[in-house]
Image: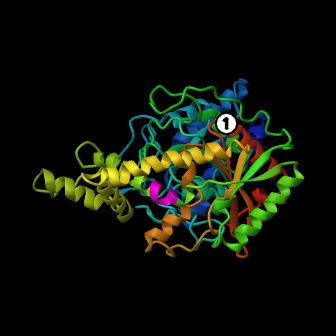
């Protein structure tokens, strides 16, 4: 049997039945990475020695009857998570020599659950990008078409799952960075409610928007991952102290009576014909499952892109000020004095997209412009959040496209930042509102590229969107299709 073709939950069943060992699965994972990653470029660091040791420990736990749903499962994490004793670069030259002294809380919880961390995944530098082309380690390729982008910034988190290199991954989502790659790569990605998963130990881009989220082949697999990493963390002041439900329980409950809202602002002119067709067909599937549709409005959607890129760049400007060559990371050793060292280290260490966003954010926060730009954007953000809360008075879930188009060609938009930023037009409002959303496959384009559907839920109601995603997957074949890699 080709173990890497199985889903996380299928692998868990095989492990529990002792049909395979975690060490066998881990070796199969590394073999698959070796066979495919020269083409996909998903991994920055492979952790073979520590992974096999963790797999051996997991096998002992299974033998002792102490296994959980992730025990012995090989997973990989985006290189934005601190991992003790392992290179943590954020795909940037400025952190090329940084080895983390501790684990991020999400990583620590994976380890406690017995998951096997097989490596660190490529990404857009400091999570800034929609295509995974902004990496010091080179662009990640889409397993469905190696000439296309996988989406960003968690592009490798989705590409690694689509390429069957690992059963599940962890990414981060600041403006769609889990959902967009999941859509482009034909896998499932979950952006939990802000505060549901600890950000402690996650290298910050925009602190009020960043959220940790799983990527896997099914909604059920994402539910298993979320059950482990979710929960209050006193080390993260934005972590919410609210009970964590059993996300795997109730997945099979029928959808009869579920009200799905269709925001008119998301079904617009210019939406790719294949994307529109896939969404229309998905509506019919939900009707057959007993769901009802209602029309809703999110009236401040037109302001979301401007609002997001003011807030995100302002927070990035503040967060990235710490990378100055003094405390950690790469330093320019040829500088003659302190100011030169600051300037040359940052000039050499940061890529062009990171520099662009730092400059935009610094301008928005500067004296005389703070009220006109940053403060106004925060007020608009409140209006956007209220739009979602008002919509949820009429429905249980919102259904929208994830992206205006399927995956585009590598290099197609990199020279036009504004066009690239519009790739996130359907996802960024969810981060501004701080609520949860899921991307699940709902069809393919004429060029055989995956298309994703976004399900948006009430704050802390991940259960409902996971149930809706799971029901759709049980009724359709899209998530079962494998990339021709």
Horizontally, residue 440 falls left or right of residue 256, namely left
Q: In this rendering, is residue 150 above or below 437?
A: below
Residue at the disc numbered 1: 70
How crowded pointer 1 is (Cα within 10 Å; few <14, some 14-19, many 20+) is rated as many
Horizontally, residue 190 falls left or right of residue 317, namely right
23 or 387: nearer the viewer: 387
Q: Which residues are magenta?
A: 303-308
User: Residue 112: which quarter of the image?
Assistant: top right
Q: Visible in this render: residue 433?
A: yes
Where residue 344 appears, as percent x and y from the top left, is 21, 59
Where residue 383 appears, as percent x and y from the top left, is 52, 47
Q: Residue 336: within the magenta?
A: no
Residue sitting at the far left = 336
> Residue at 77% of width from left, 33% of height from top?
249
Q: In this rendering, is residue 333 above or below 405?
A: above
Quadrant location of the C terminus? Answer: bottom right
> Residue at 51% of width from left, 32% of height from top?
239
User: Residue 62: which quarter of the image?
Assistant: top right
17 or 113: nearer the viewer: 113
Judged from the image, the secondary structure of the residue bearing numbered disc 1 is: loop
> Residue at 27% of width from left, 61% of height from top?
348
Where residue 23 appears, as percent x and y from the top left, is 65, 41
Instruction: From the image, give the main secondary structure of the stretch colored magenta.
Output: helix
Where residue 222 appears, as percent x and y from the top left, is 68, 43
Q: In this rendering, is residue 465 above or below 296?
A: above
Q: Visible in this render: residue 128?
A: no
């Amino acid at each position: 049997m080709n173990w890497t073709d199985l889903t996380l939950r299928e692998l868990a069943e095989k492990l529990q039945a002792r049909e395979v060992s975690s060490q066998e699965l881990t070796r199969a994972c590394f073999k698959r990475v070796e066979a495919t990653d020269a083409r996909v470029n998903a991994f920055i660091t492979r952790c073979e020695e520590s992974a096999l040791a963790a797999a051996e420990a997991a096998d002992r736990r299974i033998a002792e009857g102490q296994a959980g749903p992730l025990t012995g499962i090989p997973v990989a994490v985006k290189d934005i998570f601190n991992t003790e004793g392992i290179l943590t670069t954020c795909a940037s030259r400025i952190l090329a020599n940084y080895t983390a002294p501790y684990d991020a809380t999400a990583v620590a919880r994976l380890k406690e659950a017995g998951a096997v961390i097989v490596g660190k995944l490529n990404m857009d530098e400091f999570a800034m990008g929609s295509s995974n082309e902004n990496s010091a380690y080179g662009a990640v390729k889409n397993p469905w078409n190696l000439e296309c982008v996988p989406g960003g910034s968690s592009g490798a988190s989705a590409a690694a799952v689509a390429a069957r290199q690992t059963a599940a991954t962890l990414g981060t989502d600041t403006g769609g960075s889990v959902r967009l790659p999941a859509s482009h790569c034909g896998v499932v990605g979950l952006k939990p409610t802000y505060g549901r998963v600890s950000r402690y130990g996650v290298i910050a881009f925009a602190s009020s928007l960043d959220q940790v989220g799983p990527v896997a082949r099914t909604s059920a697999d994402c539910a298993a991952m979320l059950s482990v990493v979710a929960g209050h963390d006193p080390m993260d002041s934005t972590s919410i102290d609210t009970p964590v439900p059993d996300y795997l329980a109730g997945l099979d409950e029928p959808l009869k009576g579920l009200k799905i809202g269709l925001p008119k602002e998301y079904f617009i002119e210019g939406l790719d014909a294949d994307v529109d067709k896939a969404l229309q067909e998905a509506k019919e599937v939900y009707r057959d499952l007993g769901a009802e549709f209602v029309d809703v409005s999110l009236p401040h959607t037109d302001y979301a892109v401007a609002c997001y890129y003011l807030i995100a760049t302002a927070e990035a400007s503040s967060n990235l000020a710490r990378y100055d060559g003094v405390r950690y990371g790469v330093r320019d050793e040829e500088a003659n004095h302190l100011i030169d060292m600051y300037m040359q280290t940052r000039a050499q260490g940061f890529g062009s997209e990171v520099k662009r966003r730092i400059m935009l954010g610094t301008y928005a926060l500067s004296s005389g412009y703070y009220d006109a730009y940053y403060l106004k954007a925060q007020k608009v953000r409140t209006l956007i959040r209220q739009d979602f809360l008002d919509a949820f008075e009429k429905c249980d879930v919102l259904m929208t496209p994830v992206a205006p188009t399927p995956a585009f060609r590598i290099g197609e938009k990199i020279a036009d930042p504004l066009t690239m930023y519009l790739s996130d037009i359907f996802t960024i409002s969810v981060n501004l509102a701080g609520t949860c959303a899921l991307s699940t496959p709902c069809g393919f384009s004429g060029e055989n590229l995956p298309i994703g559907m976004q399900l948006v839920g009430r704050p802390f109601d991940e259960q409902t969107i996971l149930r809706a995603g799971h029901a759709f997957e049980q009724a359709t074949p899209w998530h079962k299709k494998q990339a021709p890699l």
